[in-house]
Amino acid sequence: MVATVAAYQGFEPYDIDWADSNEKWMPGLQRDGILVGVKWSGPAAQGYDLEPESVRTNVEYQIAT
C-alpha cells in the first residue's frame, strides 16, 4: 500500500484496465526501457521490477487460464 511508504505518501494510486495497459502503456514502457514495478508493498516497499514484455506475457497467461 502506497500510504505505508513515506516517500510515496503524496501519491494517489489509480486503476488502469488491462486493455489500456496492454495497448498504450506496455509498448511505451518497453520502447523507453522502463521496468514495471509489481507487488511493491509493506513498510520496506519490497517487490519486483520486471520487463514490460514479461508482465504482458504473464498477465495474458493468467487471463487465458
Image (cartoon, rainbow, N blue to C red):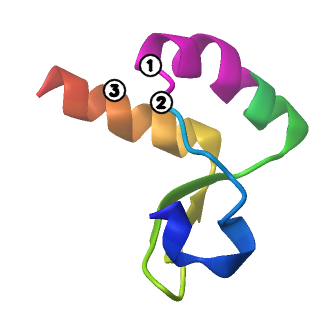
Q: Residue at x 70, y 52 (%)?
A: 35
User: What is the spatial separation of the Cα atoms under label 1 and label 2, in whole angstroms?
Assistant: 6 Å
Query: Which disc is residue 15 wearing?
Result: 2
Q: Position of residue 20 (x, y in %)?
A: 55, 13
Q: Residues within 10 Å of mark 2 (few under 14, many from 20)?
A: few
Q: Position of residue 49 (x, y in %)?
A: 61, 63
Q: Position of residue 53 (x, y in %)?
A: 58, 37
Near-viewer residue (22 or 3)? 3
Q: What is the three-letter code of the residue carrying label 2?
A: Asp
Q: What is the three-letter code of the residue carrying label 3?
A: Glu
Quadrant occupied by the C terminus:
top left
Using the rendered view, name the quadrant where residue 24 is placed: top right
Query: Which disc is residue 60 wearing?
Result: 3
Q: Would residue 23 be counted in the magenta stretch? A: yes
Look at the image and give the residue range highlighted in magenta: 16-27
Q: Is residue 35 left or right of residue 4?
A: right
**On the image, numbered disc 1 is attached to which residue?**
17
Q: Position of residue 19 (x, y in %)?
A: 47, 11
57 relative to 54, above or below: above
- Which element is circle 1 on? loop
54 relative to 65, above or below: below
Quadrant occupied by the N terminus:
bottom left
How many discs appear? 3
60 relative to 20, above or below: below
Q: Residues within 10 Å of mark 1 (few under 14, many from 20)?
A: few
